[in-house]
Image (cartoon, rainbow, N blue to C red):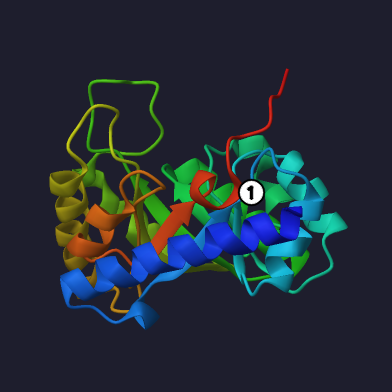
Amino acid sequence: MSRRDELAENLAALEQRITDACRAAGRDRGEITLVVVTKTYPASDVDLLAELGVADVGENRHPEAGDKAAQVQAPLRWHFLGALQTNKAGAVARYADVVHSIDRAKLARSLSRGAEAAGREIGCLVQVDFDRSDEGRAGLAPADAPELAGLVAELPGLRLDGLMTVAPLGAEPAPVFAELVGLSARVREAHPEATAISAGMSEDFEHAVAAGATHLRVGRAVLGPRPSLG
């Protein structure tokens, strides 16, 4: 089987899972944006995904993300999903269309400066961490999300799109996603345009769909086991 056929088969199976999850939740499939996470996979896979109709792809690391965006000519939306260092925000602003990992004011301001310098508008999601027991995790406390969302909404070059979370390892994802959706409703009281709710990956996205997520970040279910980095 060719790589293109393999990806087409995996995408069809994933699409069926998403459709089934939407039906079970009483939702329209059109409410869901699938972001195919292409980190560690080659640019050739991204080209094939674009041929197969994928419109949104996600990357986690700079400069890998920037190198890949430069190689791929298809008109894709590039989502930056990983923890972002402030000193790399300007570089990421040159190619990312949406950044899902805004978790501090300093990062937001740096990305704003980069967006202005590049003459671009970047969609931003505030990353929330519902597991405060691990200080190394990306994301900010839920109570702090509305304030950071307000800052993002005011900064030039940035567009507040919504909120994002990653379910804590070993935790039941459904309650976490439900909390994120509730927090999103609070943020939308002040920022009605911030409708994006980014939650759910290959192993738990059905729970995210049931909770009300609008963006699913799925890699392995489409692309298969990740290539070795070593």
Q: In the image, what residue occupies the spot 29% across and 82% down?
A: 28
In the rendered image, residue 105, in percent from the top left (x then y), is placed at 44, 45
The quarter of the image holding the C terminus is top right
Q: Amino acid at mark 1?
A: Thr
In the rendered image, residue 132, in percent from the top left (x then y), is placed at 23, 27
| Foreground of the two, 83 or 172 | 172
| Foreground of the two, 89 or 21 | 21
Give the class, few, some or many, for how many residues have Cα within 10 Å of label 1's Cα (few <14, many ≥20): many
Q: Is residue 4 left or right of residue 212?
A: right
Task: Quadrant for residue 169, please give it.
Answer: top left
In the rendered image, residue 52, in percent from the top left (x then y), is placed at 67, 71
Task: Quadrant for residue 87, please give it.
Answer: top right
Q: Would you name the residue on which mark 1 appears? A: 38
Q: Tag 1's secondary structure?
A: loop
Asked if residue 154 shows in the view, the reply is no
- Look at the picture and state if 190 lies above or below 40: below
Q: In the image, what residue occupies the spot 68% across and 32% down?
A: 227
- Look at the picture and state if 87 lies above or below 181: above
Q: In the image, what residue occupies the spot 35% across and 78% down?
A: 29
Task: Quadrant for residue 97, please give it.
Answer: bottom right
Return the residue found at the far front.
1
